[in-house]
Structure formats: C-alpha cells, structure tokens
Amino acid sequence: MKKVIHLQFLFLAKIFATQFLPLSSSSFAASNPSIAPVYTSMTTFSPGILMGSGQEHRLDAHKKLLIGVIISSSSLGIIILICFGFWIYCRKKASKPIKISGGFKDSNVIGQGGFGCVYKASLDSNTKAANEVELLSKIQHSNIISLLGSASEISSSFIVYELMEKGSLDDQLHGPSCGSALTWHMRMKIALDTARGLEYLHEHCHPPVIHRDLKSSNILLDSSFNAKISDFGLAVSVGVHGSNNIKLSGTLGYVAPEYLLDGKLTDKSDVYAFGVVLLELLLGRRPVEKLSPSQCQSLVTWAMPQLTDRSKLPNIVDPVIKDTMDLKHLYQVAAMAVLCVQPEPSYRPLITDVLHSLVPLVPVELGGTLRLTR
C-alpha cells in the first residue's frame, strides 16, 4: 500500500511540474525526456491552451487550480475507498464464529467452571482460530491457559480454550487415581509452573491482575503435566495497594482471611490460595474436609500445628510420595507453605520469592535447576 501511494504521488508530482512550472515545452522536455510525452498529450487535448509557434502554453490560474484539486481529490478518494474496503473485509473475517464439531452435548462435558460448563470439542480442520477470532485477552504466558477464540450455537455464547489432556490438578490428586501419577518432582514442577503463571499476573501485567479464584481445579495439566492457570471469570485488575471495594468471591478453603472478613483484596490473597494448593500437593488432602454432617475443617487449620513440627511432618505427607521425596526438600516446601498461609498478609512472601525458592527443587529436565545424581 505504501509503495502504491508513493508511486501515485510521484506521478502527480510530474504532472503538476509540467503544468505549473514556468518552463517552455522545449526546455522542460529537454531536461525531462521521460515526462515530455505526458506534457505533449495534455497540450493536444486540454482546453484553454494557446497554440502558436514559439509561444509558451499556460493554463489560466483558476483552471490550473481546479485541475489540481480534481486530480488530488480523485487520488485521495481512491485511496480512501481501498482502505475502507480492506477494513470491511477484515471486520467480516474477524467476526466469523469458529465452527465446532461434536456439538455441546452432555457427553462432551469435561468440567464445570464458575460461569458455566466446560465442553470437549475439536475445531474443523480448515479453521485457523488465530485468523478468525479477535483476541479477548492480552494475557499470554506459557503457564496460563491459551484462549483460542469464541463460538456460538443458537442463542448461546462460548469461549474456546486449548484442551488440557490430563485434566485438572484436582482430578489428579482427589480423583480415582489419588495422585498416583504425580511423583514428588512432578508435584514440585506443577507448583513451579503455577508460581510462574501467578508471577506474570502480579508483576508483568499493568495494572496487576489478581486471579481471585486460584485452586487445584483451576490448575490444568497438559499431556506432559505442564500446569496452566485457568478460569479468569473472577480475575480483576487492581492498583498496587489492592482494593477494598470488590465483592467477595472465591472458593471456600482458598479464600484469604483478610478478604473473607474485611473485603481487602491484594496479590497476597492469591499467595494464600497458592499456599493451600501447595498443601494439597504435599498432603494429598482436600482444602476443606467434613468432620461431620454439620462440621467442616479447613486444611490450613488442621495442618498448621503439624507442619511446624519436624517429627510429625513426615507422618502427614501423602503416602504416594512419602518414600520418593528428599526430607530436606520436604521441610523447605512445608516452611514455604506455612509462610504463604499466614493470617497476616504482610507476613506472606511475594509470589516472586516463592518462585525463586521452588526453582532449585525442580529437576533441570522439568524446568528447574536441580541436577539429579545417578
């Protein structure tokens, strides 16, 4: 487009030069042979040109101005029409919904989110989501679920995310397999991946983003057990000092005390929820467990007295990983979890500090710096 406009400008400049510059036809043609034919053709067919031997041929000033305006307006109009047509084309292309095979049937339900059901589906082979759907969010990170686009069926609207083959962390820990597929190092990798996703939200988004509903069921795992944070239905962008005016939302067992009691929401609220997830990875227990039909106990309340006692800690660890973990690393992770779930927000670490503490506990081949001895 830039080249076309540039060439049009040069062409018009040459025509104006032949019409407006006070040069004779012979002198101008001699110095500009490539433009002479244009000048000659215009003198033959243009009205108001005096023909005579040795006489300079000039248009009346008003006619020259009129011709210049007509030529300029025509060129500008053509450019505007081209741009407008291209804009219309792009809008139509972007507004086309993604067609999904399989449909939204009960048999395709793979989960339940805070704002609706999650369906398994496959895009038509000839559909390129990146070209069909306008990006709904600017949040892009390897540990945050990828948004493919949107889809519609009848009167309902849908959001299409990448499929995570291993389901959620909640499924893996508390489902039929009871965490058997998750080794100690795999659990540390999942914790590290989640911390990296949170750090991106807290430190690299402007303004910072607070997820507000971090939990094991919102941490999804791909075929290689790479973890990605999902379900941003409750996420909010706030200032560096947080907010007191956000309606209470979240999941019981993960909600930070200050947010639950006073409505104070900061990035430390996400850190608290991360601490609960860390306890789930260590202990294999749910965030809230029923003691009786009318009484429940949170994982934090139950675990805190034992997490700080080194003699008791190995006895409450998930039996699946009890014999494969490094005891020194267990104490480190337990201490980190205790800090994350402190009742006072100022005592909790930043997620960046948590991330740096986890990196040495994850093997190099899984994204950390730990080198295993053979």
Image (cartoon, rainbow, N blue to C red):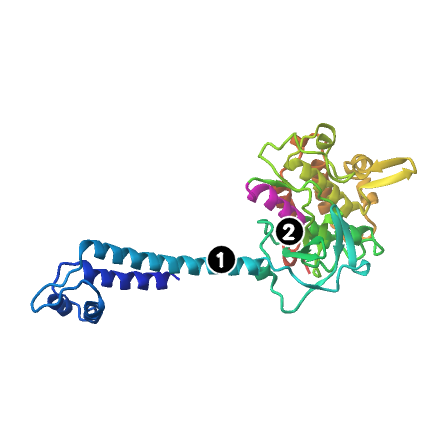
Question: How many numbered markers are drawn?
Answer: 2
Segment colored magenta: 192-206
User: Looking at the picture, how far across and down is residue 367, in whole percent?
Assistant: 63, 55
Q: Is residue 285 magenta?
A: no
Magenta segment, principal secondary structure?
helix
* Residue located at (17% from left, 71% from top): 33
Cβ atoms at labels 1 and 2 below 8 Å apart: no
The residue at the far top in this view is 262
**How far apart are the alpha carbons under marks 1 and 2?**
32 Å
Closer-to-camera residue (148/95): 95
Is residue 321 visible in the rendered image? The answer is: no
Tell which tag, 1 or 2, sits nearer the viewer.
1
Secondary structure beneath label 1: helix
Closer-to-camera residue (58/14): 58
Relative horizontal placement of residue 64, taking residue 287 as reference (left or right): left
Q: Which mark is residue 331?
A: none
Looking at the picture, which amino acid does disc 1 mark?
A: Trp
Q: Which mark is residue 87?
A: 1
* Residue located at (76% from left, 55% from top): 182
* Residue located at (22% from left, 69% from top): 45
172 over 27 or under it: above or below: above
Quadrant of the image for the C terminus?
A: bottom right
Q: Which mark is residue 144?
A: 2
Secondary structure beneath label 2: loop
